[in-house]
Image: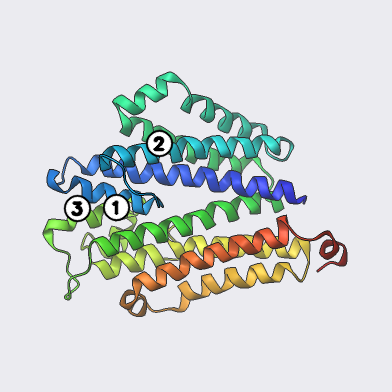
Amino acid sequence: MLSRVADSLYWMSRYLERAEHAARVVELQLNLMLEQDPDSVDRRWSLVLTALGNKEPIQGDVFTAAKEFAFDQITDGIASARENARQVREQISSEMWEQLNRMYHETRSPELTGLWEDQPTEFLGLIKRKSHLFQGVTDTTMSHDEGWHFIQVGRFLERAHATAQLVDAHFREYPQNPDGVIDSAVHVEWAGLLRCCTAFEAYCKVYTADLRPGRVADFLLLNPDFPHSIRFAADAVQQSLETIHRATDTRRSANVTRLAGRLSSGLTFTPVEEIVGNLHGFLQEVQRTCVQIHSSIYNVYVQYPIEAALAGR
């Protein structure tokens, strides 16, 4: 596969996953405002900005800044996903292009912009549904070859990094009680964290509705079956990179799979008790490894020297 094709498919998927994640987090927070203490609004929206990766100083009203940051991340993400898809139009299905192109134009329409101003939860729910539809269309209309696997790598690498960032921000904002029991005053916040990852109902099937920080961390980090857990995402990245490695059959691509394997193994074999004891450090390491995998993907599949390609290295 040409490096430009792999690059565009990878980024198309990452940008769309980023937009969907931002829509999910902000929609949940807007709904929680009905149940939260008005005096803590700034604190909670500062948490949202941190969870979405904002690095800039907050100017003016925190709520307004968070909404603007999320709106830009959503609309810019969809625009960037569409542009990458346009560059490899011949590599994706017509249904994929039609769905993403329609999504782009709708987010630029005055009607949808007005919906964001008047009913932001409706706008965000629409973004989520259209993102899910695109993922379903991709899985059912595109051959599951190298290109599809680059899409999976982009989606799940972005998901692993974003979820680690979200969980890290939440646990630092709401430290655990020594006895592991969640204070009733912040119970809604912990339920909100699970809902941000569409995990509340799945969590309850495993642990019932008894929310405890250790169990929340265990589920969101280490559950092998839930699609929004970090372990599930890491396993998906590893599996797709191994498939790409077998297809390309180069020694250099083994470096990428080793990094992905290290991330997956760390999440598979590290006990949750050990993780919770240094959760911030562990999640920071997850994010660093995601960045290393991204850099390695670029070095091997996108920006590799032509001499290395000719030599099969």
**Residue 142: image location, x then y, percent:** 66, 42
**Residue 168: image location, x then y, percent:** 35, 63
Residue 190's place in the image compared with 140, above or below, is: below
Amino acid type at image mark 2: Phe
**Residue 74: image location, x then y, percent:** 45, 38
Quarter containing the C terminus: bottom right
Q: Which residue is tagged 2? A: 71
Amino acid type at image mark 1: Leu
Closer mark to the observer between disc 1 and disc 3: 1
Mark 1 surroundings within 10 Å by alpha-carbon count, few (fewer than 14), some (14 through 19), many (20 or more): some
Q: Nearer the viewer, residue 208 or 62?
A: 62
Mark 3 surroundings within 10 Å by alpha-carbon count, few (fewer than 14), some (14 through 19), many (20 or more): some
Q: Is residue 233 left or right of residue 101?
A: left
**Residue sticking out furthest to the top:** 110
**Residue sticking out furthest to the right:** 310
Mark 2 surroundings within 10 Å by alpha-carbon count, few (fewer than 14), some (14 through 19), many (20 or more): many
Q: Earlier in the sequence, mark 1 or mark 3?
A: 1
Q: Residue at x 59, y 64 (%)?
A: 293
Q: Which residue is tagged 1? A: 47
Amino acid type at image mark 3: Val
Determine the image quadrant of residue 194: bottom left
Q: How many marks?
A: 3
- Secondary structure category for the residue under label 1: helix
Q: Is residue 18 in view from this perspective?
A: yes
Q: Give the spatial CA distance, label 1 vs label 3.
A: 15 Å
Q: Give the spatial CA distance, label 1 vs label 2.
A: 16 Å
- Secondary structure category for the residue under label 3: helix
